[in-house]
Image (cartoon, grey):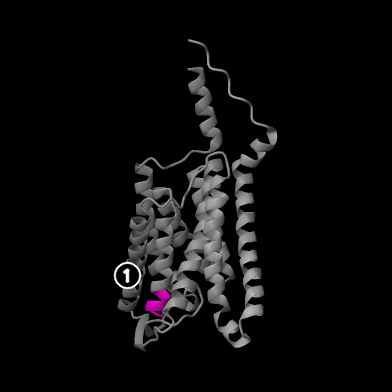
Amino acid sequence: MTDRAPAAEQPWWRKVLEFPLVAMVIALAVVVGTIAAAGALLTFALTKLVPMEIRQDHQVLLFNVVAVIGLILVYKLVIRHLGRHKRDDLALDGWFKETAAGLGIGFVLMTLAVGVAALFGVYTITGPGDFSFFVAALIGSALFPAVSEELIFRGILFRWIEEFGGSWVALAATSALFGAVHLTNPNASPIAGIAITLEAGIMLGAAYMLTRRLWLAMGIHAAWNFTQGEIWDVPVSGTYVRGLVEAELQGPPLLSGGGFGLEASVIAIVIATAFGVYMLMRAIRKGELVPPMWVKAKATKRLKKA
């Protein structure tokens, strides 16, 4: 039997492009470019084809639809092929089961938070709401944020930060970034940023670690947003929306979340963070805790020497 020929050395430029943090930056650039192109294309098309009064009423909705389609396409065509370890976090096998589970989890957790808030007297239903805007709300406050934010924060940032620095670094970094980004929302406060970091950052990061796909995290994210806003009439990360009922939050901000909504309350922090920790423990028991790349490199060298 002859010895196997050594593998050909990769050119330096390929090593650079496939380095985790470089691949991450390229993927982020692709996403930003896609969103910008969707906006420019839609503006051009609407200006040429649609009357002004119709354009103003539907431009945001149409942008969300076009952007979601564009993001999924560029992920499938470009992003999943980047980096050293090619991977498709939007693979279609089992997608319905994971998405449905996420939708159920998001609905139950937010409804539980609303129920606890009602028990404490900080949430009160004052009358019937308006559900005539169902499609616009579903796409605008649920589908677009779930797809775009999960693709960016978990499908790109978490994926490649984890490959470089390990799971703990990825979870801490993406959770903190997710909280920081929400500080730009209306009625945001430092407490709101910390709340989003803990409840959403940990929970959605753990969902990604547990499944190694985006469907569960997207389902949780979409249902969490839709349930609090379009069903229970609670501000979604500081933004007021119309719900299936008319309701109001009152009382101490620690319990009500103030103008930011229940996401900034200790109620939502405890409920969502507890469930996030539960999923994180399941992921660890499943063996999904990834060490930093330099630790893996040392282990590989020891195996080769043995």
> To which quarter of the image does residue 16 belong?
top right
Which amino acid type corresponds to the residue marked 1 in the rendered image? Answer: Leu
- Using the image, determine if residue 90 lies above or below residue 118: above
Q: Residue at x 40, y 68 (%)?
A: 224
Residue 176 seen in the figure:
no
Q: Residue at x 57, y 63 (%)?
A: 180
Residue most extreme to the bottom: 127
The stretch of residues the image draws in magenta is: 228-235
Residue 196 screen position, x and y as percent: 48, 64
- Tell me the SS state at disc 1: helix
Residue 148 screen position, x and y as percent: 53, 62
Say which residue label 1 marks: 112
**Nearest to the observer: residue 122 or residue 51:** 51
Residue 25 on the magenta span: no
Residue 198 seen in the figure:
yes
Residue 93 screen position, x and y as percent: 38, 50
Residue 234 on the magenta span: yes
Residue 109 placement, left or right of 35? left
